[in-house]
Amino acid sequence: MIVSKVDEKSTVELLQKLIQTVTTNPPGEEIILATWVAEYLKKSGLEVELLPFEGKRANVLARIKGRGTKPALIFSAHFDTVPAGEIPWTFDPFSGTVHDRKIYGRGAADMKGGMAAMLKAAELLSKEKVNLAGDLLLVLTSGETSNCSGAKKFIGENRIRNASAMVVSEPTGLNVYVAEKGALWIRASTKGKTAHGAMPEHGENAILKMAKFLVDLQGFHLDGSHPLLGKSSMSVNVVRGGVMTNVIPDKCEVELDIRLLPDQKPEEVLEKLKRIGGSEMEFNVIDFKKSVVTDPSDQLVRLAVDSVAKVTGRAPKPGGVAYFTDGCILANELNIPMVIIGPADTHMTHQHNEYVEIDRLIDCVRIFVLIAMRMLA
């Protein structure tokens, strides 16, 4: 059977190559890896388009052509990763070191491990000349970890047509996720008045005003829960204020990351924050990504669960996840069902000493092969 032909050595080497090609965002210079992946897929027999944008970024659209009697299936992955961070790693974060049946490196989990599994699945389907009723599309993007700019380019340029479902390879530990929270990013700012640090009574300290808001924000919460997504969340992740040690600051900014449930509206959240902050504070939306929910009874979900069960012997119960994916753009704009399946554990996302287990990576390739064959049979 075709799933028995997945080669571990070449799959590990492929993921190591992806990890060793640095694509941290910022700065967002994914075009080097995108160009290499485009050539890799061409050599595997796929039809490939390299789509540069914003100078040093690029998307890749690759296709295994089907007979045209069924709509296309999308395999979705992104090139960019978050930076390695300040905490020392046991292994070089851009080495792809193999230790104890694990591959370490930035992106091993989020989501170069998932991308490698999708690339190998497509390569195997192409080289084995599997007869598909519909196209298999690899939609590979840049800029996902910030504002999904690559996915927005695909939609804005109307490059994806006649697709009926999508699989995203973000980390899930080979569980099947069918829902993701929305992401509302807000910048809040306070204004003050500058003065000499030795004479603070002549100024208004914008940082102290912001400190009061942050204390009051501890009571912030949104009502409601979702059977797959639980409750909403809020975190303060960026603080900017002050210019010099001896100058009273006249401005302070914070950036908030609020994860929303499907029925929670960003404008209502904004109004609630304004009531907490008062009329002197300013609030601006940086970005908003809608939540995604697929019916657990959808055919795609049933096939995905069955494929995981066939490979692992375990049938996962469809669930939801707090992070966002390119599905917030692609699935919502194309109005298609989505599942998320990836080889690494969810908790590995953005961690130091990030890794993916080799056994799960190989199982994930097999799962993707089965999903493609069954959806496009």
Image (spheres, grey):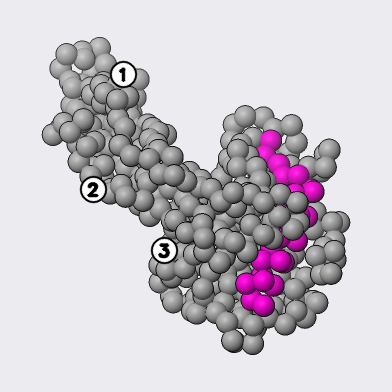
Whether residue 183 sits left or right of residue 34 in the image: it is: left
Tell me where the magenta segment starts and ends, as one range: 353-377
| Residue tagged 3 | 332
Front-lying residue, 237 or 374: 374
Q: Position of residue 345 (x, y in %)?
A: 65, 42
| Residue tagged 2 | 267
Query: Does the stretch in magenta take in 189?
Result: no
| Residue tagged 1 | 246
Front-lying residue, 189 or 200: 189
> Circle 3 — which element?
helix
Q: In what quadrant of the picture does the C terminus appear?
A: bottom right
Amino acid on which disc 2 is placed: Glu
What residue is shown at x 71% (from left), y 49% (from top)? 314
> Crowding at label 2, few (<14), some or many (≥20) Cα neighbours within 10 Å?
few
Report the residue that reaches farthest toward the front. Answer: 297
Q: In what quadrant of the picture does the N terminus appear?
A: bottom right
User: Vertical placement of 182 versus 272: above or below?
Assistant: below
Q: Position of residue 73 (x, y in %)?
A: 58, 72
Query: Disc 2 to disc 1, how far (Cα)?
Result: 39 Å
> Crowding at label 3, few (<14), some or many (≥20) Cα neighbours within 10 Å?
some
What residue is shown at x 64% (from left), y 82% (from top)? 133
Q: Position of residue 346 (x, y in %)?
A: 60, 42
User: Vertical placement of 172 versus 374: above or below?
Assistant: above
Q: Earlier in the sequence, mark 3 or mark 1?
A: 1
> Circle 2 — which element?
helix
Query: Disc 3 to disc 1, how far (Cα)?
Result: 50 Å
Query: Disc 3 to disc 2, how far (Cα)?
Result: 19 Å
> Circle 1 — which element?
loop
User: Vertical placement of 16 versus 193: above or below?
Assistant: below
